[in-house]
Image (cartoon, rainbow, N blue to C red):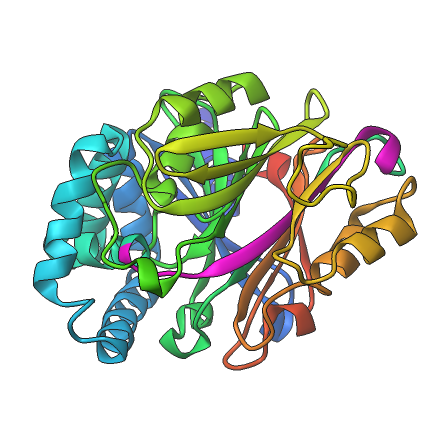
Amino acid sequence: MNKYLLLTVAVLCLAFSGVIQAEGYRTSVGTGTDQIPLIVVKGTPYEMGKQHGELMKEEATTLITTFMKAIRSSDTKRFSDDNLDNAWKAIAPHTDRRFKQELIGLAEGTGLPLKLLRRAHVMPVIADYSCSSIAAWGSATKNGHLYQTRNLDWDMNVHVQDHPLIVVYIPDEGVPHVNVTFAGTIGSNTGMNAEGIVLSEMGDSPGKDYPFNLNGAHFTTLFRKVLYDARDLDQAITLFREAKKIKKYHYVFGDGKNQRAVKIIAHAPNMVIWKDNDPSDELAPKVFKNVVYQDEGRGAYGPIKKVYGKIDHQDMIDCACKIPIKGGNLLNVVYDATALEFWVSYAKKQKEAYKRPFIHVKMKDYIK
């Protein structure tokens, strides 16, 4: 065999093994029945969306069609095609162009109509739900790293938990980042980028506030912009502050590189930022140095106090599992934003995430 043929064979073998990849690829984390699909997508936003669609075509198609059917049956008027289309028209002018391009690519890759995918992606815009988050760093943790939790609590009966997905983005332009999400979904409920920026959200808009004023950016699209562009906490806050926000939310933003975090209350159009141990924090005096949290009264203070000063990832997992909304806990994530790794648990069928194993993922394994 000549040397050129040998070289070609070697390159093909490396590509097949996952060492070299010209485009995105699919793998998984975890073992046995606890495996979670993980895809790495690369290139322009359109290319990354197309890769997502092609790599997850079966699961994405099933999730989108099942999800749309379930959510519409829950409230046929609120989630009508007209309402969903009007919601997209309202947020589209405020939505980052990269998100729109990726959605076009996703439609191309899955073969699903773009209008259907837009409707699916504005479901959270007109829905209401609640969650929780804790961030701890510095003297509060065992090694000084920034750990942050994210509980996603929603309706188990729409079955998005049946199609979990972790997406690692390696864009041509912007910061590589991870979106802990579901098949066929490019909006972000939580994520982390390669600069150590980590984002969590908690919904505050009750059903009685509907119909909402939607003339602005929704957090699921805004999170992706922040993950693309923010290289420190100040940049993340500035990007968020400059956006025209909608509805009522709490957020926790962390910076693992610089070991800092803040809690934000953004009840549009107003926005307030609390740092750690802040006497003006709505939870004061139950606050700590090097900790911010929002638990909606579900008892995070006691578990945090018990492990304060020696917190590691397992302590944060334990804390996260004590404060979900029981009966609707779809997803839990604990990030080590300093080491760029995380532990994730998805609900499976009707077994909630806090009762399920947490799978360890090292982001650096996929962004080399």
Task: Classify 272 as above or below 36.
Answer: above
Q: Quadrant of the C terminus?
A: top right
Quadrant of residue 181 in the image?
bottom left
Indicate the position of residue 77 as horizontal and vertical percent values: 15, 72
Q: Is residue 186 magenta?
A: no
Indicate the position of residue 329 as horizontal and vertical percent values: 56, 68
Looking at the image, the residue that sits furthest to the left is 82
Indicate the position of residue 40 as horizontal and vertical percent values: 45, 42
Quadrant of residue 295 in the image?
bottom right
Marks counted in the figure total 0
Indicate the position of residue 47 as horizontal and vertical percent values: 26, 36
Tell me if 168 is positioned left or right of 124 in this view: right
User: In this view of the protein, can residue 7 be seen by the observer?
Assistant: no
Task: Classify 118 as above or below 42.
Answer: below
Write the start and end of the magenta stretch as one range. Answer: 126-140
Q: Residue at x 55, y 17 (%)?
A: 234
- Which sits in the foreground, 267 or 53? 267
Q: Residue at x 55, y 71 (%)?
A: 347
Q: Residue at x 42, y 27 (%)?
A: 240
Q: Is residue 132 magenta?
A: yes
Tell me if 203 is positioned left or right of 329 in this view: left
